[in-house]
Amino acid sequence: MIQPLASLEKLVVQLRQKKQEATKLRKKAEKQLKEVRSAERRSSSGLTSIDKKIESEKEDVSDVSTVLTQKTSQLESIERLVSTAEERLEREKEGIEQAEQEIEFAESPEEKQNAEARLRSFKDHVQELIEEIKNRKKTAKKISDDVAKYSEIKSKITSKIQKQSQSKPSLRETMTTSHKAAEKFVQELERRIKSESSAQKALEKASSKLQELLTKRRKSAKKKPAKKTAAKKKPAKKTAAKRKAAPKRKTAAKKKPAKKRR
């Protein structure tokens, strides 16, 4: 019984080591699967986030473009008004020169008065035009600054959209790679779980057999001392019988000499 017990104990140790190794490999596969799934989720989340940002930024670009178009249109309109006012100013200045010449060469007081009236009118128009051109140029400068500002905003948003769009292929590739790796590690994990389960069952079976064998050995060890005690009791009975028989013989021996004296 000693040899099978030793072999079984050795087998249990080996199976326990095998089970521990299977558990270690199973945990490793779980960790790898967790990592690639985490990478896949991050990539997917990143793509979703980028898509949302791009969509939001496209809306921003659209809004900015609308304002920019309006501002540009206003600026062009004001520039046309300024150009028209400047042309009128030149004509009014020419009128002033003509009126001054008419005053100088007037042949009658009436002609001179009429020329002076026109001169005053021309001068009033010139002042009005100068003030109008000044105000419109001031407004044009403000709108031009707004156009530059919105153009810069649009450029920055467009640049961000381009950068984010460029990062999408990389994230998409990472997500695809992680997904394929996850499928691989799922299969690997299934194999490791089966291997661990098989090792666990084999260990339980061997441990059960070992326990049974140890139990039988303990019971066998308890029975052997009981037999030795029973063997010792039998000689004790014989000694008692001899002790009982010995006094009878001595008594009989003492009676015989009594008869001879008669």
Image (tube, rainbow, N blue to C red):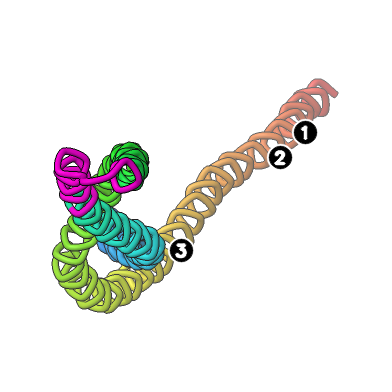
Determine which quarter of the picture holds residue 257: top right
> Distance between the Cα atoms at labels 3 and 1?
64 Å
- Which residue is identified by label 3? 208
Q: Earlier in the sequence, mark 2 or mark 3?
A: 3
Left or right: residue 217 compared with residue 238: left
Mark 2 vs mark 3, foreground winner is 3
| In the rendered image, the vertical position of residue 37 relative to residue 240, given as above or below | below
Residue name at image x 26 percent, y 72 percent: 182
Residue segment shown in magenta: 91-112
Q: Are marks 2 and 3 in contact (CB under 8 Å)?
A: no
Residue 54 seen in render: yes
Residue at left 72%, top 27%?
Answer: 250
Asked if residue 98 lies left or right of residue 13, the reply is left
- At label 2, the amino acid type is Ala
- Asked if residue 103 lies in the magenta stretch, the reply is yes
Q: Name the image quarter holding the N terminus.
A: bottom left
Q: Is residue 37 left or right of residue 177?
A: right
Q: Could you tell me which secondary element the residue under label 1 belongs to?
A: helix
Q: Residue at x 27, y 41 (%)?
A: 141
Which residue corresponds to mark 2? Answer: 241
Q: Residues within 10 Å of mark 1 (few under 14, many from 20)?
A: few
Circle number at residue 111: none
**Label number found at residue 248:** 1
Residue type highlighted by circle 1: Lys
| Residue 51 drawn at (x, y percent) | 34, 68
**How far is disc 2 from disc 1 in space, using C-alphas?**
12 Å
- Does label 3 or label 1 sit earlier along the sequence? 3
Residue 260: give x, y in percent of width and height.
77, 26
Q: Residues within 10 Å of mark 2 (few under 14, many from 20)?
A: few
Q: Residue at x 31, y 61 (%)?
A: 77
Query: Is residue 217 a member of the stretch shown in magenta?
Result: no
Q: Position of residue 234 (x, y in %)?
A: 62, 45
